[in-house]
Image: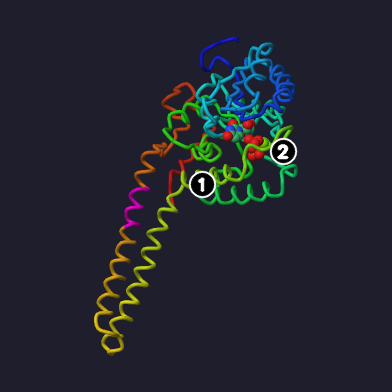
Amino acid sequence: MASESVGEITLSVVVPMYNEEAVIAGLVARLRPVLDGLHADYEVVAVDDGSRDATVALLTGQARDWPQLRIVRLRRNSGHQAALTAGLHRARGRWVVSLDADLQDPPETIVEMLRHARAGADVVYGVRGDRSTDTFFKRHTARAYYRLMRRIVGAEVPAQAGDFRMVSREVVQTLRQLPERAPVYRLLVPALGFSSAEVRYVREARYAGETKYPLPKMVALAWDSVANFSAAPLRLATWLGAGSFVACLALIVFGVVGHLRGATIPGWTSLFVAVLLFGGVQLVCLGLLGEYVGRIYATVQNRPTFHIGSDTADEPSAASEPQAVNGRPVAAARG
Ligand code: UDP
Ligand code: MG
């Protein structure tokens, strides 16, 4: 390998792989010419996410005559986003692009991504212009997902941008500093507000093998996405509490009126009123707790509340030149 230290390699390609034995030969055959054609230093970081098939053996075989291919093995299956995290921590490139192993995201797109990155974009999103090769179910669940996420996180989340994306070393550094337990990069990266560009591509069909994202994993990703970016589920308790408190007050009036008119048996009114009152008070208190838990959560996530794009004081020579700054405030956890 040309160099061993961080930042000296131009490009790292992170490829998470879980039981992808069927695609490896095809992936190498298509990815390698693209990367060799860049005429730049590169490395491919294949992250084996605890595969139980021949993935590692096949990768090891490929690495024998492709010295730029690195294999990072996770001890057990930890999920796509965790594999990406491992790749980001291990990658040494000036720019890092993440790519699915199944060739659904055409590697040729990397060339254009790198051009945008070199022109100054810190993040280059691969945006699926056409996903007609995906199943009906996948297309529609994905559309609903992106719509919901744009509402929760904000409009800076590009629709139909999955995990095919190139980021600069600065972005990697920022991401690595976040102590987030279950990062969802497709939302986290836009929320950091780095300057960005988009490259459109047509999503191809899976080259071989079958999807490693069955419904339970999709649901888990969607839940991580909501819970990472919004205290709305916690706030539900507050609203429910407030709602039932109002309902309780109305029922208390009903009970007392019944008592005054002598329409109830003795003891019922006091019991009824007490149950309602304490029920309502408890729900409100739960909601209140939720509000604080939400704030503690946001604090523990420790996302920056702002991100400096540039500061003329840091670059005195360039002070007079106009600069392309794209420093939007960060969308921190909010309801
Ligand atoms: N993947 C992984 N760990 C998992 C599930 C998936 O590393 O637990 C990898 C998988 O090998 C692939 C990428 O994540 O490279 C995306 O998975 P897949 O293509 O099956 O998802 P889909 O395109 O069907 O959403
Ligand atoms: Mg796929």
Return the residue at label 1.
223
The reply to whether callout 2 and callout 1 are in contact (CB within 8 Å) is no
Quarter occupied by the N terminus:
top right
Mark closer to the observer (2, 1): 1
Between discs 2 and 1, the one toward the N terminus: 2
Q: Quadrant of residue 17?
A: top right
| Horizontal and vertical percent position of residue 316 | 44, 22
Of 28 and 326, which appears nearest the observer?
28
Which residue is found at the position 51% from the left and 27% from the top? 172
Does 72 sit above or below residue 163? above
Vertical arrangement, residue 159 with respect to residue 23, above or below: below
Q: How many residues crowd around disc 1 within 10 Å: few (fewer than 14), some, or many (20 or more)?
A: few
Residue where numbered disc 2 is placed:
203
Tell me if the residue at label 1 has its CB under 8 Å from ligand 1. Answer: no
Find out whether residue 291 is within the magenta segment.
Answer: yes
Residue under the image location 26 percent in, 87 percent down: 260
Q: Which residues are magenta?
A: 286-294
Q: Which mark is residue 76?
A: none
Vertical comparison of 21 with 212: above or below: above
Inspect this view and state whether residue 246 appears.
Answer: yes
What percent of the width, then of the height, locates residue 326? 52, 36
Return the x and y of residue 221 as percentages of the image width and height: 54, 43
Looking at the picture, which amino acid does disc 1 mark?
Trp
Image side of residue 59 versus residue 4, left or right: right
Image position of 279 (left or right of 193): left
Residue 70 or residue 18, whichever sits in front: 18
Q: Nearer the viewer, residue 57 or 279?
A: 57
Residue 212 location, quadrant: top right
**Real-space Cα distance between discs 2 and 1?**
25 Å
